[in-house]
Image (spheres, rainbow, N blue to C red):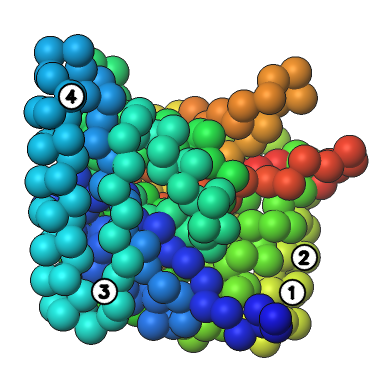
Amino acid sequence: MNNQNKPGVILVPVDFSEQCVIALEQAANLSKVFNSEIHVLHVISSDFSLSSLFSDTDKLEFTKRSKEKLEAFVDEKSKEFGVTMIPHTVDGKIYEQVVKTADILDAQFIVMGTNGSTGLKKRFIGSNALRVVRESHKPVITIKGKHHRRGCQNIVLPLDLTKETKEKVAKSIEFAKRFGSVVRVVSVLMTNDEFIVNRLTRQLDQVKKYIVEQGVKCTAEINRDTKGTGSLAESIIDYANKCKGDLIMVMTQQEDDFTDYFIGSSAQDVINRSDIPVLSIIPTPKKDTTTIRPF
């Protein structure tokens, strides 16, 4: 069978909260551009609903009601957003089942609502979203803000100097071509060292030239930490707000000595704090990484 025309998959985990509905609407917009199916996942958390306090009969009834609720929810939102959605209900730990289901479905993206909470706030759309970003093998788009434009006019692409970000640049080009976006490449300067400034300028010019050669509009600029906060994430978010960004692309990193992915502190801050959707890209492990470091 020829699978070349098989539609892609966007996976949206939901807990029926307002933020998850916002994420689902954004996923619906993406699906129309990427010609993708939307699969809606509700995880019955093993931490609560299926605890030892419930009898087997109670568990079966709870699972049945959960499936019925999801099916009704998906039917309503399919009609509201004008796209077909496929429901899935599973038991287990939320982040584990999201990652597992995305792998099984070979999802193009996971789209998750998040409230940016961490620490003691163990809410579905806070800590679980970050855990999914950290452990997913698929790109994850986190949606924190309440109001978003339907399209994607401006993609913010933060870069710095150390390892390559070819995958992130390639993803920005893919999105820009589909949406007709402008890619806004930006680096935040935390030093006045002339050598670093000149090197960074050359790097940005090279990236801009490459993106333009692919037929995509692009700007590139260096932003100084004028507020003196020392916060890379805050500077990136300020820039994204200034240029009316619709999507910020960051990259998670992989430590050579560990098997799990982790989120760099600046990337995690952006995910937690940005009201603009954030696309987290997982780099393919490579033996030689020598130019621009993943943000």
Q: Locate the N terminus by quadrant.
A: bottom right
Determine which of the numbered discs, if any, sits on residue 56 in the image: 4
The local secondary structure at tag 4 comes to helix
Residue at position x 20%, y 17% from top? 51
In the picture, measured across the screen, residue 203 lies left or right of residue 180, that is right
Q: Residues within 10 Å of mark 2 (few under 14, many from 20)?
A: few
Q: Locate the C terminus by quadrant.
A: top right
Residue at position x 35%, y 38% from top? 129
In the picture, measured across the screen, residue 9 lies left or right of residue 273, that is right
Residue at position x 48%, y 41% from top? 99
In the picture, measured across the screen, residue 82 lies left or right of residue 179, that is left
**First of labels 4, 2 by sequence position:** 4
Circles 2 and 1: CB distance less than 8 Å?
A: yes
Give the labeled residue for mark 2. Answer: 206
Q: Amino acid at mark 3?
A: Arg
The residues tagged by marks 1 and 3 sit, at their Cα atoms, a distance apart of 28 Å
* Front position among marks 3 and 4: 4
The local secondary structure at tag 2 comes to helix
